[in-house]
Image (cartoon, helix red, strand yellow):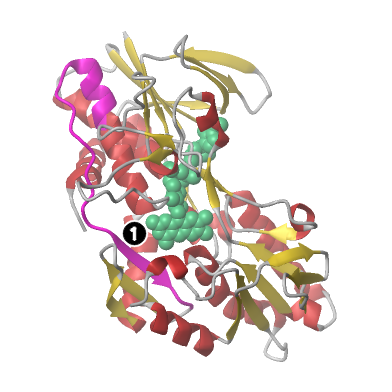
Amino acid sequence: MKHILIIGAGFAGMYAALSAARLRNEQGVSPDTLAITVVAPEPRLVIRPRLYERAPETMVAPILELFDAVDVRYEQGKVDVIDSAQKSVEIVGSDGMRRSLSYDRLVLAVGSQGFKPDIPGLAKYGFSVDQLEDAIALDHHLNSLANRLSSATRDTVVVAGGGFTGIEVATEMPSRLRAILGAEANIRVFIVDRNEVIASAMGSDPRPLIEQALREAGVETRLGVGISALDENSATLSDGQSIESATVIWAAGMRANPLTAQIPAECDRSGRLVVDRNLRVAEVPTIFAAGDTAYALTDELGHRALMSCQHSNRLGASAGFNVTADLLDVPLEPYQQKNYVTCLDLGPSDAVFTRGWDAKVELSGDKAKAMKREINTQWIYPPRANREDAFKAAEWARLVDY
Ligand SMILES: Cc1cc2nc3c(=O)[nH]c(=O)nc-3n(C[C@H](O)[C@H](O)[C@H](O)COP(=O)(O)OP(=O)(O)OC[C@H]3O[C@@H](n4cnc5c(N)ncnc54)[C@H](O)[C@@H]3O)c2cc1C
């Protein structure tokens, strides 16, 4: 029996499993001849793009039934050692017990983590919406503010980072805080960013709309400065200013999961494994990478996949197809993703949808908001737990452009 092991049950891991199972089925190969296993700490997809919303504990979707429907095995636990020479991994279970599992092909799909630099007070007092537990901790903290007396410290939120995530967090905060603190509170929300402009990576076309949305939501910006220190009650900026706030949310910078460093291969500056067009790690041909752990070309023009669901879904589906093809002597199919779109949430009734690497605005206002709702409540959720829907979704994720 051959064995495909997928580490991670996020967007990339889930689609890798479905796509691998689809090709195995298409080739008439039984699960006893080619086994597919996903290992992850919990059998659920965390909907990370929604972690800035209220009730983050609800932003999860079960995937066990889905995996059962396509004969994918699930192993609970966290991989902490990858031995690529022996083709085996070590897994630590929730009970602390260690076990090892060997593989013929591995798909590494362990995602990314927010990067917190070594700023005094950040590790202790900074919040984030990066992982589910971070978002839940922030939600508890925000709810607990209702028990404090009104003050600038209580009523002010500072978001560090004016990129995609920072903007979504900041524009959501006024209404979230209003619901907790009531109409009387003097709510202030700041975005602090070292860049001189907001959304610096998004290009100039959507910027006026974003700036207008920030103004309308009452979000203030402090640009060209960074946070140099924070404590329980304030953030100090690099220009010496101080903002009184009990809530500093760090939303600047992502790094690939540190497990990528265990593979003896080249990584980019974010720690992502450099992969070829088939998503294989050149130095270790039995390993493929997908999602936020892969540094992959999307087209012939030199664009690279970003740390996003849009790229993770297709990277996962492509990697799943190719590991299976590799073991079944089927031709591999290069990963391609020519179209690139973004849909940026801008608060309760606004969003902006862009198309292309130069981010041309295609929709704004309530039309873009309707699209964002559809993306966030339907498109990024797992397919229904039956073979037909699962296999269709896997091929759609692998081949269909937006
Ligand atoms: C607040 C926020 C908003 C975002 N908004 C958007 C957006 O609007 N649009 C967009 O496209 N993208 C957005 N993203 C980015 C998107 O969520 C990520 O790019 C995407 O989740 C990456 O998918 P992935 O499968 O690579 O990793 P993840 O979704 O992070 O999944 C990683 C998986 O690996 C598992 N894992 C981790 N370590 C181990 C281990 N040691 N052993 C076993 N399993 C392990 C995890 O439990 C998880 O199952 C947002 C992210 C955040 C945080």
Quadrant occupied by the N terminus: top left
Q: Tell me if I can see residue 29 in this picture.
A: yes
Query: Where is residue 329, by image quadrant?
Result: top left
Query: Where is residue 97, by image quadrant?
Result: top right
Report whether the residue tagged 1 is closer than 8 Å to ligand 1: no
The answer to whether residue 212 is left or right of residue 304 is right
List x then y, in percent, for residue 358: 29, 67
Identify the residue at image location x=70%, y=66%.
227
Residue 346 covered by magenta stretch: yes
Residue 77 drawn above or below residue 318: above
Query: Where is residue 285, by image quadrant?
Result: top left
Pick the front one: 382 or 19: 19
**Circle 1: element type:** helix
Q: How many numbered circles does the render carry?
A: 1
Q: Tell me if I can see residue 61 in this picture.
A: no
Callout 1 crowding tier (Cα within 10 Å): few <14, some 14–19, many ≥20 = few
The residue labelled by disc 1 is: 378
Residue 70 drawn above or below residue 57: above
Residue 352 covered by magenta stretch: no
List x then y, in percent, for residue 290: 37, 37
Identify the residue at image location x=46%, y=76%.
346
List x then y, in percent, for residue 83: 51, 15
The answer to whether residue 265 is left or right of residue 136 is left
Pick the front one: 55 or 150: 150
Residue 114 drawn above or below residue 22: below
The answer to whether residue 213 is left or right of residue 372 is right
Identify the residue at image location x=68%, y=74%.
157
Quadrant occupied by the C terminus: bottom left
The disc labelled 1 sits on which kind of residue?
Gln
List x then y, in percent, for residue 85: 46, 11
Pick the front one: 172 or 269: 269
**Stretch of the chain drawn in magenta:** 321-347
